[in-house]
Amino acid sequence: MNPIEVLTVGHSCYDLSFYVEKDPKSDEKIFATDLIICGGGPGANAAVAVRRLGGTSAFCGYVGKDDFGEKILDEFKREGVDTSLVQRGNAPTPVACCLVKPDGRRAVINYKKSTPQLSGEGINTTLIKPKVILFDGHELAASQEFLKLAKKENIPTVLDAGSFHEGTRVLAPEVDYVVASEKFVLQKTSSNNSLIAFEQVSKEYKNFVLTLGEKGVLWKCQGQEGKMKSLPIIAVDTNGAGDAFHGAFSLGLARGFNWKELLLFSTVTAALSCTRKGARTSFPTKEEVESELKKIRASTLFYENY
């Protein structure tokens, strides 16, 4: 059994990121100023982020037996991600096309076709022993099998709640920490006010973190609540920033960080990833994050009333 700090369970795809001045109109041809290709997917990206930060990680998800699948596995190998729980098949590897604008924001087109959901029955949960398990909500059956293991072995669990769908709806009440996007709370409450949505949703879960990009982070944990400001950065590409946050958050949990250390570590990791192009290609190293942390006065970022 391999000891692993963070196991991520979820979606893997191959990303093609085109950098454009604007979104194309109907029947319009535009030219990209840059192109970055690499592996992607929330769970897969988080596993890579953990490795960049000096942690050990494994990924459980689907990868097709095609050229994109081979590229993904080669990348995992180079990064040092354990792939013993990766399942392969003849259905194509999912592909994502990202259009990234000059302000760093992006639009994403996903192609999954007949890519199957993993069967929980085919997962050997005894292959590795993780300290923390991170779910992205895209492999529900497999995630539920690992939830059983987590509850039996007292392993902390985290959910990347990027949007409100069947997977995140079912898993959110079962995990120890829900780290959600603004999209998740607005969809779940049918609200257009993030603060009101946060107040409603955070009551439902044990520990809840809402990431709001440049607007910072709202949180409720063990009866405490507060807000953390964002870091002043010039965003180049926000693609993958949430995945970097989730990977860092899970690694910090595995290493016993206190709550504010955990949020600061995760926020710095995500912020640095926004200052470079690409998702995985932008993830910072342990040394880069540690260097940035030395420059920050944490007391100026946290406040209890918001």
Image (cartoon, rainbow, N blue to C red):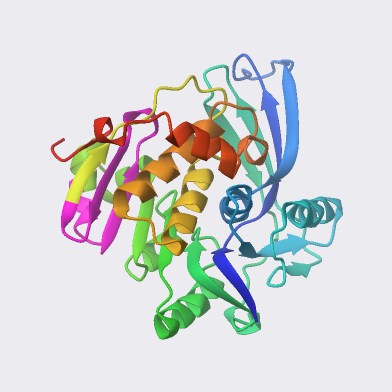
Residue in front for this viewpoint, 96 or 7:
7
Is residue 207 a member of the stretch shown in magenta? Answer: yes
Give the image quarter of residue 16.
top right
**In which quadrant will I find the N terminus?**
bottom right
- Residue at the spot 77% in from the left edge and 68% down from the top edge: 88
Near-viewer residue (14 or 190): 14
Query: Residue 79 in the image: x percent, y percent?
Result: 72, 52
Question: Where does the image place residue 64, in percent across and percent down from the top left?
Answer: 78, 61
Residue reaching furthest right? 67
Q: Residue at x 46, y 63 (%)?
A: 254
Residue 38 in the image, given as x and y percentages of width and height: 73, 41
Residue 65 in view, yes or no: yes
Q: Nearer the viewer, residue 23 or 162?
A: 162
- Taking 106 as reference, is 6 above or below it? below
* Residue displayed at 22% across by 61% down: 204
Residue 264 screen position, x and y as percent: 38, 42
